[in-house]
Amino acid sequence: MTYHVLVQFDVPPEKRDAFVKAGLFDAEGSLAHEPGTLRFEVIHDEDNPNRIYLDEVYASREAFEEHCGNETIKKFYEMVDSYALGPNFLFKGYRAEPAAG
């Protein structure tokens, strides 16, 4: 079962581009160097341009926990810590799959 995480950040308008760049840095580094990271997308909210989501999928909860301790995410937080409000975890959980049988 894959493990899914949706995280929300609110950023000032003048920092949106910088935040997206930092989010893409985290996404690209995670996908390139963490085998358990299966998907990592940076998404703009269509109703609030200052709200950005990180939509992440991992092979397991353990892979997510490993991601949380890696250098890429640490660097991401260093890049956005002075202005981003978040992370606000909207959800964490496992994908529902049909029962075997």
Image (tube, rainbow, N blue to C red):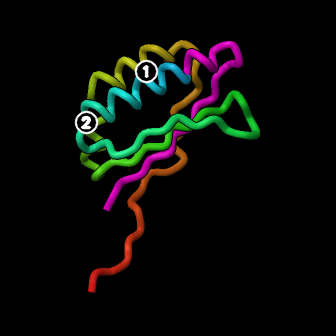
Secondary structure of the residue carrying tag 1 is helix
Q: Label for residue 77?
A: 1
Q: What's the CA distance linking mark 1 and mark 2? A: 18 Å
Is 66 on the left or on the right of 58, as rendered?
Answer: left
Which sits in the foreground, 77 or 32?
Answer: 32
Report the span colored magenta.
1-19
Local crowd at mark 2 within 10 Å, few (<14), some, or many (≥20)? some
User: What residue do we see at 42% from left, 15% from top?
Assistant: 78
Name the front one of labels 1 and 2.
Answer: 2
Tell me the kind of residue under disc 1. Answer: Tyr
Q: Is residue 26 above or below residue 46?
A: above
User: What residue do we see at 41% from left, 68% from top?
Assistant: 96
Q: Name the quadrant containing residue 74.
A: top left
Q: Is residue 11 above or below residue 14?
A: below
Magenta span has 14? yes
Which sits in the foreground, 55 or 65?
Answer: 55
- Quarter of the image with the N terminus is bottom left
Which sits in the foreground, 25 or 88?
Answer: 25
Q: Residue 84's spot in the image, x, y percent?
A: 57, 22
**Residue bearing the label numbered 2:** 34
